[in-house]
Amino acid sequence: MEIEHQTLRLARVALHVVSAGSGVPVVLLHGWPQTWHEWRRVMPLLAERYRLVVPDLPGLGDSSKPADGYDKKTIAADLREMCERLQLDRFHLVGHDWGGPTAFALACAHPPSVRSLTILDVTIPGIGPDISQGGRRWHHAFHMTPDLPEALVRGREREYLSWFFREFCWQRGAIQEADIDEYVRCYTQPGALRAGFAYYRNIPKDQADNRAILNSGFRLQMPVLALGGGRTEARGRGEEPLESLRAIASNVQGGVLPDCGHFIPEEQPAMLAERLLGFFSAC
């Protein structure tokens, strides 16, 4: 599989975008504390049939790091501009972790452009099961605290990120030292910690925005696939993503992926690709 790297200079941000394959477009959105690199094992399994567009989200990876604008509606607007620049007319949209609420915001804002929506191991803030699980996701409150996480994590990025890759992962060999090296390279860049924590600091705004959508009576009409990691002891969310999306979408399927924690694209790439290929072909 040949991949292409480019930087798109958009109105608000410069996005690092990786592309591969050909055919109907598929946009893959990563989460925290990762980058486009989390899709490395899934991409070869999809690229023979689809054109893959895989950005580093604003503020993360090798994309630029604006001072603000990390609510998911604003991030979705950046990605909409990316799609227009790349002449993506209609595309399948897949989001894991923070890529999920971002994908949801994009699908709500521009439903005719989204052939299908896939949400992986995350709930939509303000809709269905609590994204922070009533505080059990302790790091949400920590990351939302102004300035303190940056002060405590800076200089210890490898130790901090490695804890998540270890404790949120059921397949322990899925994220190797070389992968952690790449994530640490990105999250030690100037402004990267602040940008990553800003995704969490905007949870209250995301919740308010999404509740307003829900209360308006709007429902997503495109096919939706919602999958959670089946091993809840490794922070997989189980049926929660499916429950969340059923509250706002009319055509939802999904469930859990077995022997998998939170990091679905890295823990079960073949199983995920099989589900995606079957889902896309039916849309």
Image: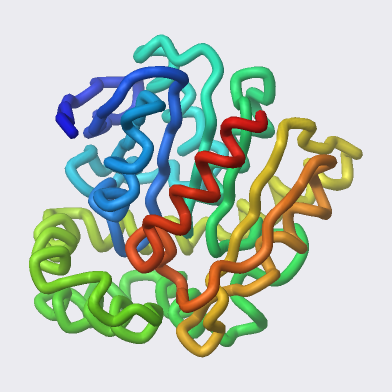
Q: Is residue 240 above or below residue 27?
A: below
Q: Where residue 41 sits in the image (x, y, percent)?
A: 28, 52
Q: Where residue 112 sits in the image (x, y, percent)?
A: 67, 18
Q: Where residue 98 sits in the image (x, y, percent)?
A: 47, 55
Quadrant housing residue 6 = top left
Residue at 74 percent of width and 53 percent of height: 245
Q: Is residue 45 above or below residue 131?
A: above
Q: Is residue 144 left or right of residue 46?
A: right
Q: Is residue 273 left or right of residue 217?
A: left
Q: Nearer the viewer, residue 209 or 120?
A: 120
Residue at 71 percent of width and 36 percent of height: 223
Q: Is residue 117 above or below residue 228?
A: above
Q: Nearer the viewer, residue 23 or 36?
A: 23
Residue at 13 percent of width and 54 percent of height: 190
Q: Nearer the viewer, residue 86 or 276?
A: 276
Q: Where residue 262 sits in the image (x, y, percent)?
A: 45, 71
Q: Quadrant of the N terminus?
A: top left
Q: Nearer the viewer, residue 43 or 146?
A: 43
Quadrant housing residue 241 = bottom right
Residue at 14 percent of width and 76 percent of height: 158
Q: How many marks?
A: 0
**Chosen colour scheme:** rainbow
